[in-house]
Image (cartoon, rainbow, N blue to C red):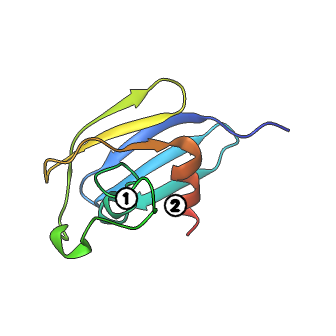
Amino acid sequence: MSEPVPVGVDLQDSKSRLSVAWSDGSSSSVGYRALRLACRCALCIDELTGKPLLDPATIPAGIGVADCEEVGLYGIQIGWTDGHRTGIYTWVRLKELSNA
C-alpha cells in the first residue's frame, strides 16, 4: 500500500499550528515553534557534521508564518515571521514531526 498524500494544509494561526490532512483520512499537526526549530536547512544544521547551528533561545515563543508555498510534489517552504525562509519541510518530515 502506498503512503498517504497530503490533501490539505491548514495554517491555524490562532493555535500556532500547521495541520495537514492526508488522503487516508488521517491528519497531522505541528506547533509553529516546534516546526521552526526542526528546520534542517544549511543555516540551521551544519551540512557536514549535522550539528545544530540554530540557537532555540533565538526563536520567539510566538513565532508565526508569514507565507507558505508548495515545493514541487514533495513538501512546503515556510516564510517565518523571524525572517527565516530557506528550509523545506517534506511531507514525510511533517508526518514524522507530528508523531514525535
**Which is in the foreground here, disc 2 or disc 1?**
1
Location of residue 88 (image quadrant)? top left
Q: Amino acid at mark 1?
A: Ile
74 left or right of 64?
right
For marks 2 and 1, give the CA distance.
17 Å
Asked if the residues shown at circle 2 and circle 1 are in contact, with their CB atoms under 8 angstroms apart, the answer is: no
Which quadrant, please, contains the N terminus?
A: top right
Q: Secondary structure at mark 1?
A: loop
User: Mark 1, residues whose alpha carbon is within 10 Å: few (<14), some, or many (≥20)?
Assistant: some
Which residue extends farthest right? 1
The residue depicted at 57 percent of the width and 36 percent of the height is 6
Q: Where residue 8 appears, x then y in whole percent?
A: 49, 35
Q: Secondary structure at mark 2?
A: helix
Location of residue 78 (image quadrant)? top left
Q: Mark 2 highlights which residue?
A: 97
User: Mark 2, residues whose alpha carbon is within 10 Å: few (<14), some, or many (≥20)?
Assistant: some
Q: Mark 1 highlights which residue?
A: 45
23 left or right of 59?
right
Sequence-first disc among 2 and 1: 1
60 left or right of 100?
left
In front of the other: 69 or 9: 69
- Above or below — where is 92 with respect to 5? below
Which residue extends farthest top? 72
Which quadrant, please, contains the C terminus?
A: bottom right
Q: Where residue 10 appears, x then y in whole percent?
A: 39, 43
Q: Amino acid at mark 2?
A: Leu
The residue depicted at 17 percent of the width and 65 percent of the height is 62
- Above or below — where is 67 with respect to 12? above
54 left or right of 72?
left
Which residue extends farthest front? 48
Q: Where residue 4 appears, x then y in whole percent?
A: 69, 39
Q: Where residue 32 appears, x then y in whole percent?
A: 31, 59
